Image (cartoon, rainbow, N blue to C red):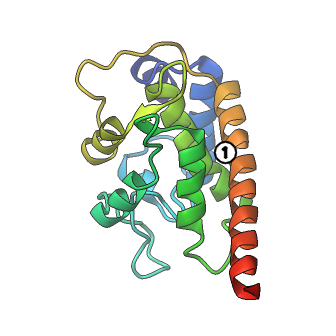
Amino acid sequence: MLSNALQEGLYTSLPLASFLTYGGFILLQQFGAISLTDLARHNHTEHLASLAHGDPVPWDAEYAPSAVDLELLEQLMGDANLEKGGFDVESCAKARVRREAAYAGDLDMVHAIIGRGEMALTLGILGGEDKVVPSEMLRRWFVEERFPEGWKPTRRWTLTGTLLTQLDMRIRMGRIRREMEKAKAKVKNA
């Protein structure tokens, strides 16, 4: 039933809907009925360094906050590609690097993929053929958790599209991190 809802509501392919559904059950370690609250279970599907949600308090709490953190959201809006009027793969990579830099260690592989994958899904579903999501559309998506007025899908978004977009984001994140390290070294040696 959840897989069907993803296909109809988000206009995803069957393989993507199945991957998200069964992957979610496995990560939650919960089979059968789930609620939206369950998706905020920390270190299962939910992860540190969310672009618009705060971390759990205390750190070992079972659930992370599900309400949008407006300060984090404004920081995210600052990462938009102004020339394109919104968010593309590059600006999402920049946002992920900025947010992950606030932590002493790296996210584990699974949660790093989830973090990139969330934005890959957002770009693919809301971004049209060029995968650019207007800033105000992204803001409304995060704050109101619903599709913008009049939004219609332009194509069925796929598992392959999601994986390739998150991989592109990962490569760009590596480049951005290397550029930041070079800039720091240059300042240090000046």
Eyeballing the image, is 156 above or below 93? above
Eyeballing the image, is 118 above or below 59? above
Residue 80 visible in the current orientation: yes
Position in image of residue 163 (x %, y %): 70, 35
Q: Quadrant of the rendered structure where residue 185 is?
A: bottom right
Farthest front residue? 190
Eyeballing the image, is 160 above or below 22? above
Position in image of residue 7 (x %, y %): 49, 19
Q: Is residue 60 left or right of residue 36?
A: right
Q: Is residue 126 left or right of residue 71?
A: right
Secondary structure beneath dot 1 equals helix
Q: Is residue 86 left or right of residue 111?
A: left
- Tag 1 residue: 169
Position in image of residue 84 (x %, y %): 46, 34
Residue name at image x 58 percent, y 36 percent: 20
Residue name at image x 50 percent, y 65 percent: 42
